[in-house]
Amino acid sequence: MSIPAETVAIAKTTVLFVLAAAAEIGGAWLVWQSVREGKDWWWAGLGVIALGLYGFVATLQPDAHFGRILAAYGGVFVAGSLAWGMIFDGFRPDRWDIAGSVICLVGVAVIMFAPRNAG
């Protein structure tokens, strides 16, 4: 039994968005820790490297449209940032944070996976 190509494409897109979010959010968090929380300078250096890695991961998306990828990633960033805050900083989102995050992820799904004309 083979996996449909569309399922593989959705899985690849999702994995790449998660990797991009980890690199960008993690990189920004490392810089934040250095500058705002007084961690050593090399935390910021690692953050800069992670932010650069994010830029490369985004280029691996199957869709060739920069604007579409970055627009959709914005929604992933919103949800990922709230999750990162929960995991690493003890942040507790309220119902409005969660509602906004869900709205963003629905937007991601519409942008990335809506049927489009091939022509």
Image (cartoon, rainbow, N blue to C red):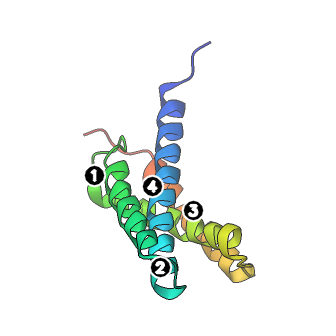
Give the Cα separation between the discs numbered 2 and 1.
Answer: 34 Å
Classify mark 2: helix, strand or loop: helix
| Sequence order check, earlier mark of 4 and 1 | 4
Q: Residue 32, percent across and down? A: 48, 79
Which of the numbered marks, if any, corresponds to residue 32?
A: none
Please state which amino acid type lies under the numbered disc 4: Ala
Q: Amino acid at mark 1?
A: His
On screen, residue 22 above or below 100: above
Side of 27 where 106 appears, left or right: right
Is residue 69 visible to us here?
no
- State the separation of the CA atoms marked 3 and 1: 19 Å
Q: CA distance from mark 4 to mark 1?
A: 16 Å
Nearer mark to the viewer, of 4 and 1: 4
**Image x and y of residue 15, in percent:** 52, 44
Residue 68 in picture, x, y percent from top left: 34, 57
- Which of discs 4 and 3 lies nearer the camera? The answer is 4
In the depicted view, which residue is nearer to us: 82 or 32?
A: 32
Q: Could you say whether the residue bearing mark 4 is in a helix, strand or loop?
A: helix
The residue where tag 1 is placed is 65
Q: Earlier in the sequence, mark 3 or mark 1?
A: 1
54 left or right, relative to 1 = left
Which structural element holds mark 1? loop
Closest to the observer, 102 or 58: 58
Residue underneath mark 3: 105
